[in-house]
Image: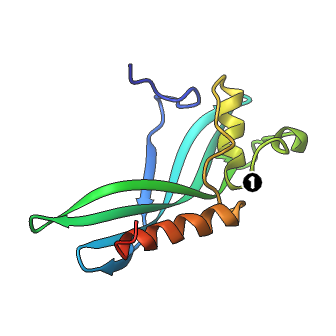
Amino acid sequence: MNQSPAEVDPRFTIVGSVSAPVIHQNGDRAYVELPTVTNMRMMVQDVQTEIESYRRLIYRVEKRDQDWKIASMISINESDSLHAVIPGEKLVIDPKELAKFRPSYQFLSYVRTAAGGEVSQDLLGTDRPADIKKLYAQAQAWVDHKA
């Protein structure tokens, strides 16, 4: 059953935008880096808030029968922020509540947990540079036909 995450409020539209892609190509294979930002409004502590989440999508693409096809996609969490939408309204979050979440997606984790959901703390994020370095090495090996 497809169900929205616990913090999604159907009254508000989720807005996503992307920046220009960076393409690393070798013949019939490439990996594409696509910076994205998602803005999502929701109610937190009876305050209308907006979470802004920055991610980098890494697509592995391959040319098959003259068409480029997506072989895989993975998301890297870069950072996020949370603020009250209406100027003058106050949103107070205890820093101790945030401390248990990873910096690259701490506000997403906070709002989802507050709404009764869960977020894995093992997702890819810029706060774990060794994991990111490994991902890029794997993507390059795939482009070079070594994986």
- Crowding around mark 1 (Cα neighbors within 10 Å: few <14, some 14 to 19, many 20+) is some
Which x, y percent locates residue 51? 62, 47
- Residue at 23% across, 74% down: 28
- Residue at 56% across, 41% down: 41
Q: Does 60 sit left or right of 140 as displayed?
A: left
Give the quadrant of residue 71: bottom left
Which x, y percent locates residue 87? 70, 50
Q: Does 54 sit left or right of 19 as displayed?
A: right
Colour mode of the rendering: rainbow
- Label count reads 1
Disc 1 marks which residue? 103
- Residue at 32% across, 79% down: 25
Q: Please say if 90 is above or below 113.
A: below
Q: Does 114 sit left or right of 63 as displayed?
A: right
Q: Tell me the element at label 1.
A: helix
Which residue extends farthest left? Answer: 65
Q: Amino acid at mark 1?
A: Pro
Q: Please say if 110 is above or below 54.
A: above
Give the quadrant of residue 60: bottom left
Which residue extends farthest front? Answer: 146
Which x, y percent locates residue 35? 48, 66
- Residue at 63% across, 32% down: 43
Give the quadrant of residue 120: top right
Which x, y percent locates residue 119? 64, 36
Q: Please say if 23 is above or below 5.
A: below
Q: Quadrant of the C terminus?
A: bottom left
Q: Does 109 sit left or right of 17 as displayed?
A: right
Q: Quadrant of the N terminus?
A: top left
| Residue sitting nearer the eye, 66 or 110 | 66
